[in-house]
Each structure stands twice: as structure tokens, then as C-alpha cells.
Image (cartoon, rainbow, N blue to C red):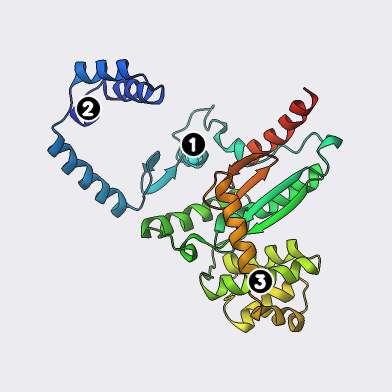
Amino acid sequence: RCLLKHEGDERFWSLAAALADALWRNDHDKLEALLSEYGQQAADRAQLSLEARRDQFLKDGHYLTGTLHYAGEWYWSVERLDHLGHRLNELGLGGADWPLPYGRAKRARLKDTPEALKGTPLALYFSFRSPYSYIALARTYALADHYGLDLKIRPVLPMVMRGLTVPKAKRFYILKDAAREARLHAVPFGKVCDPVGAGVERCMAIWPFAEKEGRLREWLRAAATGIWSQGINAASDNGLKFLVENAGLDWNRARRWLDDDDWREQAEANRDAMMAAGSWGVPSFMTQDDMTWGQDRFAIIEQRLLASLQHDDD
């Protein structure tokens, strides 16, 4: 309400910073002093304004705060400022030092290879319906192979198959953003066949067979690539056969697993473990006791792995 009252003032940004600082430091005295000095918009007027703004926000195509909107394109969180920086550069609007290295967190450096990290566990919580899970695969494999990590992949059902609703604006933004991130990492993307429902369940049913055959990595790569870049319908026999054979698996043997629902119990256990560790969605990564969410945090995952060695030395 205080910010709404001063929305057109030159001091808006400094006031916003001061209010945020007081809130996040839990400084009640400073907060009360700011509100007393600057005042607030009337509660009923503020409510109407915020409701109208929310409706316009969703209509314009987004659903989260901490988001920038520039010339028709959305940039959510600091992990997308690299895209905005590159776009401004292409328009001739950037300076020599722009963009700042916001995108650096998306990739691991993969420079040192300490022997002590070999065998360290890394769990990836993965969903076939998550384009971000697909985009993260190659970098996950590269990180695990570089450091000799014990990579365990934990399947979970997508949010909408767990009874959670996903706003329409979120679905559209995710596809556009995933395409942007896929281009950044040179991952094929764009010809999509949504596997929600039967497609996901059939891919999950093949999971234990692929693991038993020692080709789980290949199965994830083949299935996700088919779903997110080749438009393969995993819910059909022909589509699933194509994916299975692309993973180097025998279709006649694989199809016998489609009537086995044992994977459901494991998927539920994985979901429970993921949420207990502090995450709610995929892809999420568990290193020792640390949970990290997002395909754009590989440098952070790597830092935590390397920091664990220093902790062990201490």
C-alpha cells in the first residue's frame, strides 16, 4: 500500500529497496518508521488496484513476481537476465560489460577432478513431462562422469498427475522459456508431444526394465528427446516402440513391463523424499544433504560438491 501510494514518485525505487530491506531483515522499527513517514494507499483502493494488476499480469502471459517484461518477452529470476542482456546487445543497446555473468550458474566448470569426489552420491529427481528435466540431462551426465559421482535417477510423476493445478499462463511460459534455454545449451527442442497421462505412465513403466538392462541413461535420453524434440506420442505403441528401440532396448521384452505397476510405489517414495528434502518440483538434485532445484543451478551444485571436500578436511 505504501508503494502504491508512491508509484509515480522519483523516490519509488529507493523506497521499495528500503521497505524490502526492513522486511527481509525483520526490522519492525524501521518498517514502522517508513510507513509512518511515507503513508499508505487506502486499503479498499489498494485491493482493487492489486486485483486488476493480477488479472493483467496473467493476461500478458506470466504468473510469478520477480519477473521482467521487455518488448513482449518475459524474464523470470536472475537466471534469465543473461537472455535479456544478449537481446539488448543484439539491439545495440548494451554496453561493453553487459551482460553480467548471470548465466554462469547454469553450467559447471568441470575443471578440477578431485579423487575424493569419486563415488559421491548425486540424485536427480526427474519427470518425463518436464522440459527442464530433459534440458538438464546432458549436463547432469557430464557432471556425474567428470567427477565420478554415483548418479541415481529418481522418477516422479508430473504435478498435474499428482493432483496439483498448473495455471495456463505457466504452461505457455514454460514452453517458451524451455525453448530459449534449450537453444542456449544446444539441446534439440520444439516439436513437442505432451506425454501427460498415458504417455508418462508408459515411460515410467519402461523405467525399471531399462535400469535392469543397464540402459537407464539411454532410455531417459531417447524418451525425453522424442517427447520434446521429435513429437513422438509415447502413449501409442508405435511411438513407444520408436523410443524404446532408440534407447537400444528390445521392444518385445520391454512391452511386457507395461502391465506392471510396481513403479508407482517407487515414484511415490521418490516424491516423498524430494519434498522431505525441501523441493517440490523437478529437476531437483540432491548432493549429500543439500537439495538444489532447477536446471540452471549446475555451478551451484558443483560448488557444493567441492565445498563438501573442504568440510571433510575440516
How packed is label 1: few (under 14 Cα within 10 Å), some, or many (20 or more)? few
Q: Residue at x 40, y 60 (%)?
A: 165
For label 1, the SS is helix
Q: Nearer the viewer, residue 39 or 240?
A: 39
Q: Is residue 39 above or below residue 222?
A: above
Q: Mark 2 is on which residue type?
A: Cys
Q: CA distance from mark 3 to mark 1?
A: 40 Å
How packed is label 2: few (under 14 Cα within 10 Å), some, or many (20 or more)? many
How packed is label 3: few (under 14 Cα within 10 Å), some, or many (20 or more)? few
Q: Which residue is mark 1?
A: 78
Please say whether residue 231 is visible from this viewpoint: no
Q: Mark 1 is on which residue type?
A: Val
Q: Which residue is mark 3?
A: 262
- Of badges 2 and 1, nearer the viewer stands 2
Question: For residue 266, which quarter of the picture?
Answer: bottom right
Per the rendering, the mark at residue 2 is 2
Number of residue marks: 3
Per the rendering, the mark at residue 184 is none
For label 3, the SS is helix
For the N terminus, which image quadrant?
Answer: top left
For label 2, the SS is helix
Question: For residue 2, which quarter of the picture?
Answer: top left
